[in-house]
Amino acid sequence: MAPPDPILGVSEAFRADTHEMKLNLGVGAYRTEDLQPYVLNVVKKAENLMLERGENKEYLPIEGLAAFNKVTAELLLGAQNDVIQQQRVATVQGLSGTGSLRLAAALIERYFSGSKVLISSPTWGNHKNIFNDARVPWSEYRYYDPRTVGLDFHGMISDIKAAPEGSFVLLHGCAHNPTGIDPTPEQWESIADVIQEKNHIPFFDVAYQGFASGSLDTDASSVRLFAARGMEFLVAQSYSKNLGLYAERIGAINVVCSSSDIAKRVKSQLKRLARPMYSNPPIHGARIVANVVGNPELFNDWKEEMELMAGRIKSVRKKLYDSLSAKDNSGKDWSFVLKQIGMFSFTGLNDAQSENMTNKWHVYMTKDGRISLAGLSSAKCEYLADAIIDSYYNIS
Amino acid sequence: MHGGGNTSPSFSSFSSSSSSAADRRLNALVRHLEGSSLNGSRSIAASPTSGSHGAPNSVFDHLVRAPEDPILGVTVAYNKDPSPVKLNLGVGAYRTEEGKPLVLNVVRRAEQMLVNDSSRVKEYLPIVGLSDFNKLSAKLILGADSPAIQENRVSTVQCLSGTGSLRVGAEFLARHYHQHTIYIPQPTWGNHPKVFGLAGLSVKTYRYYDPATRGLNFQGLLEDLGSAPSGAIVLLHACAHNPTGVDPTIHQWEQIRQLIRSKALLPFFDSAYQGFASGNLDADAESVRMFAKDGGECLVAQSYAKNMGLYGERVGALSIVCRSADVASRVESQLKLVIRPMYSNPPIHGASIVATILKDRSMYQEWTIELKAMAERIISMRQQLFDALRSRGTPGDWSHIIKQIGMFTFTGLNSKQVAFMTKEYHIYMTSDGRISMAGLSSRTVPHLADAIHAAVTRVA
């Protein structure tokens, strides 16, 4: 009997719990202040428009909806970016972030046989599964420094440098999952330097564009930095969080190449991998994104809603930080809660401490100490602070 | 465009002055590929934007342009043709008498209900998909009174239409089943060998279609399955075999079942046309139910692409009928491990539409009526084409057109005749002679009949 998924299994356990103070900080799904799931207004508008138009349900091409592929690449790189103008990006609609990563992994397995993917330590739990199932070898580069609860920058650079030339380096575009710790712009430059030096191939996972800072362009700056250097790289995108389209499974794999001819060839090979996996991708989510991003009014509405969502998360971070600082007299520095970016916070709690959070306090989180701030309301910040302090100090 | 100023596309002689690694790789690739027909093969020659000619080297340079998918490529070619009489008989997507795609009324209604329901959210589905959808899908294919379902021996997971269900099932078998060979019928849907191959299974064939009779080579089928190693996996088309339209009779199915069980072969059904073949959902599921109720194990990949017209929504399900409820539960936990690293969890929209329809008695009824109408239109196209060929005195026996079942007819035309029909009559179809009856209308039958008549009388 296979064990439950370490991340998705948390929600299952939460659902089974009947305690009134229970808190689900497991999955990274946005919740309102009332801790309700949220369907963006702009998504409802788009769906109503689609229904009015009465569009058909014919198969999409293997590479997905053309209108979606166009807007998603532009959103990522900027419509005026050279890469777009020169048609140097191969974009294929994929099944959200996971599906897009898997297509890329399949491409690596077939065309870069023996090449490794370097992944951060820690990283999203499913990354390893994806590369394992795709039969792509991987190894880790240092990332999280538990002493500073920050980035182990020197460790990261050393490990990337030490890897065999031509490795793929998996980078989180923004809002690193699970730590919430992102490199600074200067650090990104150094990371790009060492990658170029070793002829590595950058591979971005962009699941939070717009969600991290509230600005779509700011959150894409790491990717655009690499594009500006004329580098070739891959980017897996997801619209699960930033458009709240979790269950519609909408994302894309983008491969930025040195010429448009090569981009065409890469796209054709991605199609060859998608066809025996699921033939062609689902239309509904793609149409929603194409409608929202392609319509200036809806696009503006979206940007406003996204700022609200990112803003709520920033404000619970502040409230949690204030509660922790007020309740903890030991002088421990809890400011990492404020510095970390995006939906998640790496609390620094270990296995046993995380279990105490669940068993004693009915706070559901993943064993690596990750909490999803998207699942926290300002009303529950004090309760959470109590739970964290108790677990941190009384359990070893 | 060529670096060496050659007048003929002699790839091996280009860039003789340059011996960069990129050029050597290109030369090697081109030597491998000469003779095969590739789209845009000229792009493989050194273009000004590649490697040694000025632009930076690409790490992707060794990737060649893949050809269009043979089935989907037919539509690509059709779209390019400006002729007003062109006919697309390629992909198996239903068309109305007016030649238009169809969204079923009951589907529109269900979708309206879903979009207007303000309590609905877009949270991740569980890895196994929408629970209602899974239960209803299992009942649809296995029968509401199926003992296997009542005994909790069936594990059902929502997947991406037929293809996704086949792929997840195949990956699961490659990981957990002791025999890694799958036998597929000759011929079969073009994507089958690729799905199974990439999942890690080794693919063999069993005889199926008899070109002499344009029917089933039953003896050959029994011999080939009879000599398969014990435990091997066998792919079976539940009804409306694609591409031939030739199905075993119920009596033949029973013999196949006995043979399969006697050799402990593992049946894997592909059910993409339930309700579409005969117009009756139960009749079209008889082959699967025969196996499911004999106490043995089997897999079934279901698709709602055609019978609910949900093509682009990618709705399907994989059911595994197991010996016991405990096994079924363990199987489900392992299926989740296949799915999570592939796409995490399935898309909600199409499955919600299906569940809405299947669980509401009047919507279900409405669906069966619309489904029957589609099946009957296709059956009537078969009759009309048959009559049209007979009235033209086209040489040959064309009764297979009305005997074959489902969306497709395996005409028996060879690839030269097909090419002729495309060139002279703008008929688009796959080169194996398969035509999608769903793409025909009373208005266009005469044109197709003329084309077939000309092909048969003028091309060998």
Image (cartoon, coloured by chain):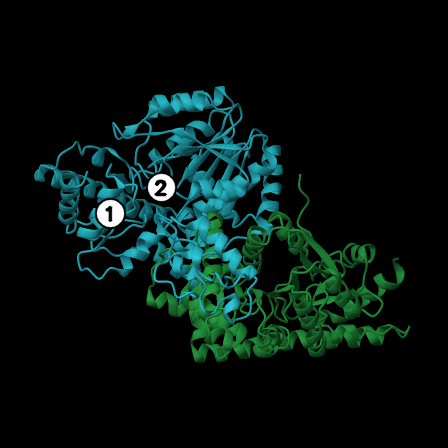
Chain colours: A green, B cyan
Count of marks overlaid on the render = 2
Residue drawn 79% across and 66% down?
Answer: A155
Q: Residue at x 76, y 60 (%)?
A: A369
Residue A40's x, y, as percent? 52, 70
CA separation in Å, label 2 and label 1: 28 Å
**Badge 2, how many Cα within 10 Å: few under 14, some, many 20+?**
many
Above or below for B458 versus A190: above
* Camera-side residue of A158 and B449: A158
Tag nearer the camera, 2 or 1: 1
Left or right relative to B64: residue A118: right
Q: Is residue B152 left or right of residue B98?
A: right
**Picture coordinates of residue B69 (x, y %)?**
39, 51
Q: Is residue B46 toward the left or the right of residue A38 in the image?
A: left
Q: Secondary structure at mark 2?
A: loop
Looking at the rendering, in which quadrant would you find the C terminus of chain B?
top left
The image's mark for residue B273 is 2
Q: Residues within 10 Å of mark 1 (few under 14, many from 20)?
A: many
Q: Quadrant of the N terminus of chain B?
A: bottom left
Q: Secondary structure at mark 1?
A: helix
Farthest-out residue, right = A330
Of residues B285 and A235, the one nearer the viewer is A235
Label 2 amino acid?
Tyr
Amino acid at circle 1: Ala
Q: Position of residue A310 (x, y in %)?
A: 62, 75
Mark 2 and mark 1 lie on one chain; the one further toward the N terminus is 2
Q: Position of residue A236 (x, y in %)?
A: 57, 63
Callout 2: residue from which chain? Answer: B
Query: Closest to the observer: B370 or B436?
Result: B436
- Residue B419 tag number: 1
